[in-house]
Image: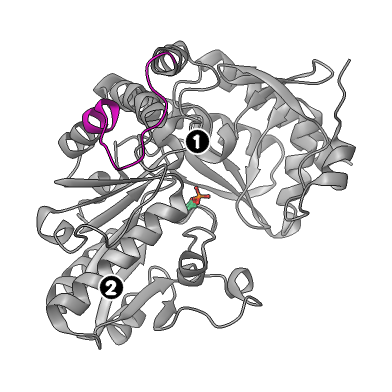
Amino acid sequence: MTDVTRKDFDEVMVPCYSPMAVIPVRGQGARVWDQQDNEYIDFAGGIAVSCLGHCHPIMVSALSEQANKLWHLSNVMTNEPALRLAKKLVELSFADKVFFANSGAEANEAALKLARRYAADEFGEQKSKIIAFNQGFHGRTFFTVTVGGQAAYSDGFGPKPGDIEHIPYNDIEAFKAAISDDTCAVMMEPLQGEGGIISPSAEFAQTVRELCDKHNALLIFDEVQTGNGRTGEFYAYQGLGVTPDILSTAKSLGGGFPIAAMLTTEALSKHLKVGTHGSTYGGNPLACAVAEAVVNHISQPEVLQGVKDREALFLAELERINTQYPMFAEFRGKGLLLGAVLNKDWEGRARDVLVAAGEEGLLVLVAGANVVRFTPSLVISTEEIKQGLERFEAAIAKLYNA
Ligand SMILES: *Cc1c(COP(=O)(O)O)cnc(C)c1O
């Protein structure tokens, strides 16, 4: 039947991943099927990417329509889908200007380069310090991974981009001590995803904004994971009441088609003049056509409200499961970016939960060794949430009673 298997991965792929044993071959809504036609409910959503589930008709028609019109031009010319998408993102956010890229890391790379260029142009080369946060995640290019808060990810690749300081997230005193007039930018997730689903306190977020203003430092929000409705707001900053100067978005933006964007203000955008930055694929018509359809759908108030309703259902069911099989210390996160934090007895066993869930036909994620993460489709049905959580309960029960 099939001529490739998981074994081929070890033969021909660079071993920087360790994928699950099964190979999904098709998906529909919040379900996927593997090579053996086993069915899974998908609470992982391709790591917060598949915001409309798999093969949503809106995305399929946007992609196939564009596929019959025009695939690629490069930025030597602009294109209609890119312009329409940019206008929509401007309408939906604080931003006046958009730069398109192909991945979260690239959008963050653009954000960091813009911040450094702005500071150098306006204040001089000494204003180059970047403040970022422990266990933050910003991608895998060498600049972004070094700004990320896990040194293990950036060690061992030679000299690192410099002048980057990491401090604890949510620590107002540490932040006050770190920021100065030499600070160029602060890069933070408005809810840490990979780092363990950690929300900032309102006071922390406000202090960061105020001190950035005081020291002429730019505030960069990495909304690669939180953006596009994931938290129940179109962007998480809107729920936090703190507006950044630069915002990066990717993951859910294309609903599974690779695309990313950096959003910023008119004044800042002027510092990236012709020739200062670019990308061959950035703003590709296929990607932008799909993202336009995704954004138009997700940004509707009833869809965003639907995310909040689904969050409530998830939390209520998880609490119920936890009274039956007390394995979790707390549930945290926002919208459909949720984390189940293992209690002391189960510390470090998030991966065991992921594997057990897989055996019951449920795909989940982890966020570190201690947190089981859920980032399903934002339009997953109530039925599928309930059925998925039944499978989760079965997996938990097995582990609990083992
Ligand atoms: C996933 C992620 C990135 C990296 O995105 P890529 O598309 O993998 O480059 C950056 N920042 C955050 C917050 C992310 O969750």
Q: Residue furthest front?
A: 76
Mark 1: secondary structure: loop
Circle on res. 49: 1
Of the residues tagged 2 and 1, which is closer to the observer? Answer: 2
Q: Are marks 2 and 1 in contact (CB under 8 Å)?
A: no
**Left or right of 230 in this view: 149:** right
Residue type highlighted by circle 1: Val
Nearest the camera: 298 or 325?
A: 298
The stretch of residues the image draws in magenta is 68-85
Say which residue label 2 marks. Answer: 116
Asked if residue 317 lies in the magenta stretch, the reply is no
Asked if residue 78 lies in the magenta stretch, the reply is yes
Nearest the camera: 386 or 368?
A: 368
Residue type highlighted by circle 2: Arg
Residue occupying the point 37% across, 49% down = 223
Residue occupying the point 55% across, 83% down = 159
Q: Residues within 10 Å of mark 2 (few under 14, many from 20)?
A: many
Residue occupying the point 78% across, 27% down = 360
Residue 49 location in percent, x, y?
50, 35
Quadrant housing residue 120:
bottom left
Q: Is residue 287 visible?
A: yes
Residue 205 location in percent, x, y?
27, 62
**Badge 2 or badge 1: first in the primary sequence:** 1
